[in-house]
Amino acid sequence: MKFICLGYLDESMWQEMSDTQAAALMEKCFAYDDLLRREGHFIGGEALAGAKQAVTLRSQKGKINITDGPFTETKEILGGILVLEARDMQQAIELIKAHPGVGIGPFEIRPVDEQIERIMAARQSA
């Protein structure tokens, strides 16, 4: 099964880290990602730019409204996405529990919707 793992972080906490601390944390994260890759669990992932560089689109009364940044009422913002292969949710949880990124913010884990994946694959092959 495929899982999308959304990693959140408190940007102020990240900004308070020294360059050395941030580099050390990133190295730990990359090393764990390499382990996941070697074990066949890491499918892909992307780090995201800061919230100040984001825009949010919403449809309201037939019109698209664009606002700066994510609309959030928490300090935590989406920092990155990891695509994971695991046999089930429990294994996905066990794999992400060991990720160093959990130390700077929560991870949300969601199974990929396999029915929609099959529909998309069929459309691409047609």
Image (cartoon, grey):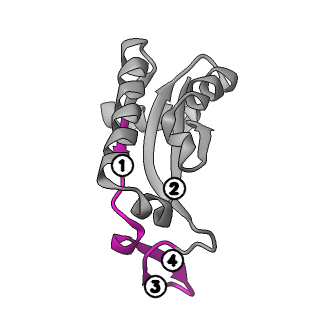
Label at residue 58 = 4
Residue contact at pointers 2 and 3, CB within 8 angstroms:
no
Q: Secondary structure at mark 2?
A: strand
Q: Quadrant of residue 42?
A: top left
Quarter in which the N terminus is drawn: top right
CA–CA distance between discs 2 and 4?
24 Å
Residue carrying label 3: 65
CA–CA distance between discs 1 and 4?
34 Å
Numbered range of the magenta stretch: 45-70
- Circle nearer the N terminus (2, 4): 2
Q: Is residue 67 visible?
A: yes
- Circle nearer the N terminus (2, 3): 2
Residue located farthest toward the top when viewing the structure as drawn: 39
> How dense is the environment of label 3, judged by Cα within 10 Å: few (below 14), some, or many (20 and up)?
few
Residue 43 in the image: above or below residue 9: above
- Circle nearer the N terminus (1, 4): 1
Residue carrying label 1: 22
Residue contact at pointers 4 and 3, CB within 8 angstroms:
yes
- Circle nearer the N terminus (1, 3): 1
For badge 3, the amino acid type reads: Asn
Q: Residue at x 56, y 84 (%)?
A: 60
